[in-house]
Amino acid sequence: MAGPRPIALTMGDPAGIGPEIAAHAMAALENRIAIRYVASRAAMAAAIPGRPETADPQAVIDSIRRAVELVRSGECAAVVTCPIAKKTLTQAGFAFPGHTEYLGHLTGAPRPVMMLAVEGLRVVPVTVHAPLALVPSLLTTDLIVETGRIVATALTRDFGIAAPRLAVAGLNPHAGEGGTMGTEEAAIIAPAIARLQAEGIAVTGPHPADTLFHAAARARYDAALCMYHDQALIPLKTIDFERGVNITLGLPIVRTSPDHGTAFDIAGKGIASPLSLIAAIELAAAMAAARAP
């Protein structure tokens, strides 16, 4: 009987820490998880660590596309992506803000959702890479509802949680303090919570964000929906900076990545930690197994 399908691991930016942490991760997981490294040898050989201008943007993009093809064809079980340099790709004509949006394009997923996870905490920013000044105008009841549905479905399908519990953060200090510190909670967030509850999803909130992430609070939910990027990522990275995993929900495939960037400043020095990538590969394998018929 054939063993489990391998995980497709993309090379990321070859001038960053991707190649070295990939090597460490594959060595660490050699006897537990099969990995197929999707990389261009020519691009890897030409890149100089710490110098993003030496990387081949098209080779980086092709690595992602090929990894998705391997999963959709059934040859691989999941995609794990090493970090990319968005600025470098954008300058080369890449039309997507990052991995998440490109993966949605490749798979035809209309609404990819970003989840970040460490042991004991999963967070989902409802708005992602948006300037803080624009967040209030981007938040809508429909957006929160749609995000909550996707998260609840993923918690059941990919994490084996039969009755997922969601906690929703407020946008303003003290979750608006009854309207004296902001109206988004009453006008936008609370109606979304009510709609999700009406659909049978266990949701609470809006909660003041400053009381949502201590240990006792985290025990009361399976994922927290946050209103903006830093509201979600600051507590997660404070709890475990080195082992955070980025997960894209709402795709027809499993995709994870380490929760850090290319780290050009330390590339090639042999000091980059592979722990986040190892955690991403382990989680991708577990999620793929949960989805298997």
Image (cartoon, rainbow, N blue to C red):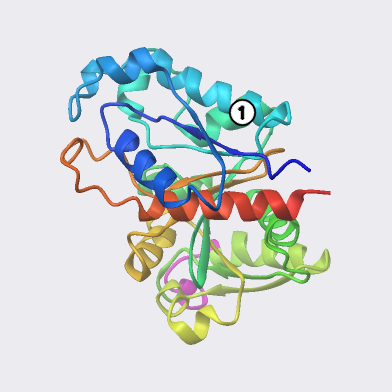
Q: Residue furthest bottom?
A: 216
Asked if residue 182 is among those painted magenta in the image, a careful observer would answer yes
The residue at which mark 1 appears reads as 68
Q: Quadrant of residue 40?
A: top left
Asked if residue 245 is among those painted magenta in the image, a careful observer would answer no
Give the residue type at disc 1.
Answer: Val
Q: Residue furthest front?
A: 1
In the rendered image, is residue 146 in sight?
Answer: no
**176 w.r.t. 82: above or below:** below
**7 w.r.t. 125: above or below:** above
What are the residue bounds of the magenta stretch? 175-184
Around disc 1, counting alpha carbons within 10 Å, would you say few (fewer than 14), some (14 to 19), or many (20 or more)?
many
- Per the image, label 1 sits on a secondary structure element best described as helix
Name the quarter where the N terminus is drawn.
Answer: top right
Give coordinates of residue 238: x percent, y percent: 32, 68
Q: Seen in the image, is 106 located left or right of residue 13?
A: right
Give coordinates of residue 254: x percent, y percent: 64, 43
- The residue lying at 53 percent from left, 64 percent from top is 122
**68 w.r.t. 94: above or below:** below
Q: Seen in the image, is 110 located left or right of residue 19?
A: right
- The residue lying at 19 percent from left, 22 percent from top is 48
The tally of labels here is 1
Give coordinates of residue 149: x percent, y percent: 72, 55
- Tell which of 85 and 4 is nearer to you: 4
- Tell which of 27 and 231 is nearer to you: 27
Give coordinates of residue 74: x percent, y percent: 73, 31
- The residue lying at 44 percent from left, 23 percent from top is 39
- The residue lying at 64 percent from left, 67 percent from top is 190
